[in-house]
Amino acid sequence: MFPTATAAVRSVVAYLVILAYIAVAAPIGIVLAAVFRWTAGLYALGHVGVGLALGLTGIRYRLAGRRHLPPVTTPVVFCANHESNADPAVLFRALHPRVHFVYKAELHKFPLMGTVFDVGGFVGVDRRDREAAIASIRRGSDRLRGGDSFLIFPEGTRSRTGELLPFKKGGFVMALQAQVPIVPVAVSGGRAAMRKGSAIVRPVDVTIRVGAPIPTTGLGVDDRDMLIEQVRAAVGRLLDEGPVTEGPKRF
């Protein structure tokens, strides 16, 4: 077990460094994306920041199934389970250089975060407002048709037990409307990074398994339940394969 005192000190250092990085890098990235329309610069800064956070906290990952990752120019919806706060960061680093997120609309209220999400092309979904949620899904579909790839966590919240929760439909409707493949992703091992109610981040090794893309061509929105079952089963099978023990650890 990693010593709690060491983890606490390491966490404080990481928080201070990342906050300083955000204060400097976020305004630069916003200007690059909003003024010069260079969103690649915003994403490059994001990857540096996430890599810095993972490195400082000692969170590493191994990825299996790299052959299933699509070319950058091929839009897809990555569909992942969600068990820890480390999941979005490691998947952002591992899956795609400019992956977009479907996120809870309430995150938009945090300083700088909402602006970064807007100029980065992320899609916020307010599940309390059905009309707004439908409009968000439509925006996501348009971005997929325009060539952007998205990452969704269809469980909607973290699983506390590791068992897959029911999948929500929004991201699947996006993929169906845009007729793009869904790539199943299983992520595990990150739950021990942060205990419930604690701000201390502990070093962990995370496993990411990527499955074969599941096509949506020819399917309609009425097929969403069948598609959800198919993707959920694929994620479950990837989770059953267990930790990745070969290959380099990355952050």
Image (cartoon, rainbow, N blue to C red):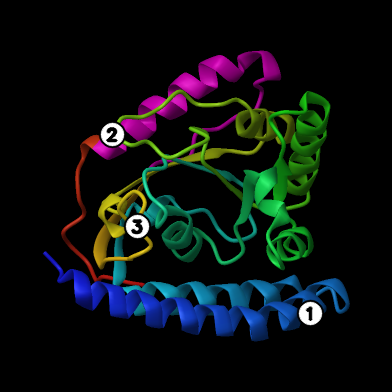
Spatial separation of the CA atoms under disc 1 and disc 3: 35 Å
Spatial separation of the CA atoms under disc 3 and disc 2: 18 Å
Task: Name the residue that disc number 3 marks.
Answer: 198
> Marks 2 and 1: in contact by CB < 8 Å?
no
Spatial separation of the CA atoms under disc 1 and disc 2: 41 Å
Residue 52 on the magenta segment = no
The answer to whether 250 is drawn above or below residue 197 in the figure is below
Task: Name the residue that disc number 1 marks.
Answer: 32
Q: Residue shown at 42%/50% (left/top)?
A: 68
Which of pointers 3 and 2 lies earlier in the amino acid sequence? Answer: 2
In the image, what residue type sits under mark 1?
Leu
- The answer to which of 215 and 136 lies nearer the viewer is 136
Neighbourhood count class around disc 2 (C-alpha, 10 Å): few under 14, some 14–19, many 20 upward: few
Which of pointers 1 and 3 lies earlier in the amino acid sequence? Answer: 1
Residue 224 on the magenta segment = yes
Q: What secondary structure is marked by label 2?
A: loop
Which of pointers 1 and 2 lies earlier in the amino acid sequence? Answer: 1
State which quarter of the image contains the N terminus: bottom left
In the image, what residue type sits under mark 2?
Thr
Q: Residue shown at 31%/68% (left/top)?
A: 59
Task: Name the residue that disc number 2 marks.
Answer: 161
Q: What secondary structure is marked by label 1?
A: helix
Q: What secondary structure is marked by label 3?
A: loop
Is the magenta region chiefly helix, strand or loop?
helix
Q: What x and y, as percent, mark residue 142? A: 80, 43
Q: Is residue 49 left or right of residue 55?
A: right
Residue mark closest to the camera, 1 vs 2 = 2
Q: Where are the magenta residues, as a range?
A: 211-239
The answer to whether 103 is drawn above or below residue 173 in the figure is below
